[in-house]
Image (cartoon, helix red, strand yellow):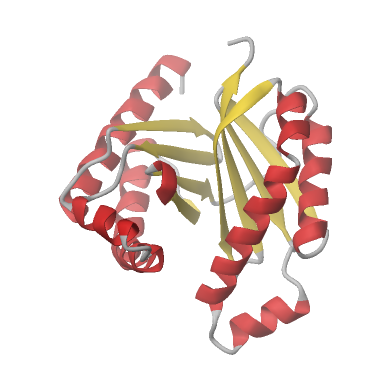
Amino acid sequence: MTRLALNTKEKELGSYIGKILRDHFGKGPGSVFAAISYPYVTVYIKDFLTPMENKLLDSEQEKYVQKIRDMLMETLIEEIKAYIKLNIDMEISEFYYDWNLSTHTGMFSGIAAGSQKNSSTYLNQLGVHNEIIEVSIKAEKAPVNVYSCLLNPRTLIVVRSGILTAIEKEIIKIGYPEILTLAKRNLEKGILDEHKNQLQSLLDADFENTFTSWDFDRDKSVFLFILKPHNP
């Protein structure tokens, strides 16, 4: 597929995501930016918060907002995967999402079935991987594998596999994955912030936003970095 054709597909996907969010939540996002680079599809959502969610956040009820969104996403994920298969000809086998409620932003990331090795190289890629490994060691343990792809100058996805510790696996086994997700999100984003300057220097870009999500069944995790390049 040519770059021009991909640009069209990205715009169409962004429009579709905006529509289904509006249909299911009653309010659509201010803007949606999609990026496609096989085997990855990412969606960055901005200015997305319903009036009801805003009231809940004002009452410090963030966990209820997350819970409501999780319930709705169970339906949306299959719809999004079906759209991508039909319109972009990619069979998404892994789907991740995260919300930064404080900035009214969110992300979706899909990984197609098949090869998931680095589909691109970029400046200081190994250094970025080493920083991510350090973050993982502080939070849980070193991942078995780390790979990444700079989909475009503003979108970097980093995938880790083999990150769960024995105690985390046991927490999941006894039925508390939601608590583990909450704890890991807070912990890893805090540690990631400690490495922010090093990562920004390696990438020659500032972070506009960072997201993280896990697939506990696969023992995998995704970081999505939305970048503001110093030299666009």
Q: Nearer the viewer, residue 80 or 126?
A: 126
**204 horizontally vs 137: left or right:** left
Residue 96 in view (yes/no): yes
Determine the image quadrant of residue 10: top left
- Image position of 55 with respect to 33: above or below: below
Q: Residue, x 78% and y 53% (percent of image)?
A: 145
- Image position of 4 with respect to 11: above or below: above
Which quadrant, please, contains the C terminus?
A: top right
Residue 143 in view (yes/no): no
Q: Residue, x 68% and y 29% (percent of image)?
A: 120
Determine the image quadrant of residue 138: bottom right
Q: Position of residue 157 (x, y in %)?
A: 61, 39
Q: Residue furthest bottom?
A: 174
Q: Nearer the viewer, residue 87 or 101?
A: 101
Q: Position of residue 186 (x, y in %)?
A: 60, 59
Determine the image quadrant of residue 38: top right
**38 horizontally vs 22: left or right:** right
